[in-house]
Amino acid sequence: MVHHTMNISSTMAPSASSNNRVMGQCGGSLVGWRAHGQVALRWLAGALIVGSLASCTVVPRSYPPAPPTGSVPPVVSVPDEALPGVPLQRGKSLWVPVRWSELPGWGQDSLHEVWNAWVRGCERPAPGQALPCAEVRQLSIGTPAEQRAWVERRFQPYRVTEPDGSVPAGLLTGYYEPIMAASRTPTATYRVPLFAPPSGLRPGQPWYSRQEIDTLPAAQAALQGRAVAWLADPIDALILQIQGSGRLNIVEADGRTRQVRVAFAAHNGHPYQSVGRWLLDQRAINEASWSAIKAWALQNPERLNDMLWSNPRTVFFREEALSELDARFGPRGAQNVPLTPGRSIAVDPQSIPYGTPVWLATQGPTLNIQRLVMAQDTGGAILGAVRADLFTGWGGWSDEAYVTAAALKQPLQMWALVPR
């Protein structure tokens, strides 16, 4: 998405926390570049736009095959007694063992709500997660008591801290998957193209910049016939590129309307630059929010290209069919599994590996939650030990997914669950 929240390249698969996606994934602000996608108009405005986010797209890892399913494992209670094990060094973080009773709110979360995300994650089980994944599938039909008892028996919770053991304030932001109107063919209303990758694009080699794509005949010739869809607003196209993926209510050439997904396929090899930062530096706006940017663009149409060209990066897309089942989930994140609203997060993989179950606690003006989530995505702005980007779902400007993602910028605590 999904966020630029993830580092992206022409050979990488999309990440829902793209650059964040909320100003579009992925960092959780308008200043950021999910993709992952992975904007409150306060945080989103400030972060996504001003921040420098990288796309949420990463190369999916190679994972072992999913284990077979079976009967529901027996419920065995585990006393909350002595702490087993020692702290675990995990790249950018230190994991410190704790008791289950130290997890705020543990026992109050509706674990069945995270089970779909866990099962989807088991399509690409991370190293060390294959055996637990077999039981995760079995427990899809288990009771809440069976699920909770199994988690306590099968996993040891670890507090995620800085490498020196200190506990930071942490940061939680949000990203979403935008829904936009589009046309299969250019019209008087829909004049802004979304392109598939050109044939001359090479990994690691810069292609034409955004300005060159708009002005050079050679670049335009290379993109001839490569338009996937056409949008009405160039800023909406920019938002979609920052998010890394989105859904289009697209009008086909025969007049039919259907919903499809466009996902990150590649970029032109140029660095991302925030248009929000450019406008702030020009003293053209007072806050870096999408609403402020759109208002400025309406009042200054003669300078619109200057603003857009300040960001030389262009993202290319591929179209994906959206079945009834696909529509119930978000785009695929860095783990290469579909994201689940409210239960999938983008993380720094050097702190928390993909596929890790994570207990998340945050309290602030936007969300007060204590819940189990799955680390399934990443993003260029998602860096550090206690840093996450919550996938909030999909929708338009007035929908809850966007409103929450745009506003979310709060302190965060995290606990990683490690198989015993």
Image (tube, helix red, strand yellow):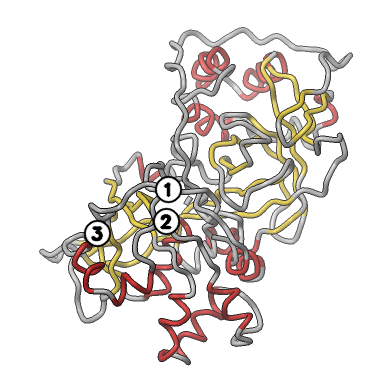
Residue at image position (42%, 74%) is: 235
Residue type for callout 1: Ser
Classify residue 292 by image quadrant. Answer: bottom right
Which three-letter amino acid code belongs to the residue tagged 2?
Gly
Label 3: how many Cα within 10 Å (few below 14, some 14–19, many 20+) = some
Residue toward you, 387 or 366? 387
Q: Which residue is mark 1?
A: 9
Residue 206 point in image, percent of width and height? 39, 57
Question: Callout 2: helix, strand or loop?
Answer: loop
Mark nearer the N terminus (1 vs 3): 1
Q: CA distance from mark 1 to mark 3?
A: 19 Å
Residue picked out by circle 2: 269
Q: Nearer the viewer, mark 3 or mark 2?
A: 2
Q: Secondary structure at mark 3?
A: strand
Amino acid bearing label 3: Val
Q: Residues within 10 Å of mark 1 (few under 14, many from 20)?
A: many
Q: Secondary structure at mark 1?
A: loop
Q: Which of pointers 3 and 2 lies earlier in the amino acid sequence?
A: 3
Mark sitting earlier along the chain (1/2): 1
Query: Residue placed farthest to the left in the image?
Result: 254
CB within 8 Å, label 1 to label 2: yes
Disc sitting over residue 206 in the figure: none
Please give the name of the residue rendered at 45% of the width and 37% of the height, measured from the top-left corner. 59
- The single residue placed furthest to the front in the displayed view is 205
Give the mark toward the camera: 1 or 2. 2
* Residue 25, visible in the rendered structure: no
Query: Residue 228 got which mark?
Result: 3
- Nearer-the-camera pick, 236 or 302: 302
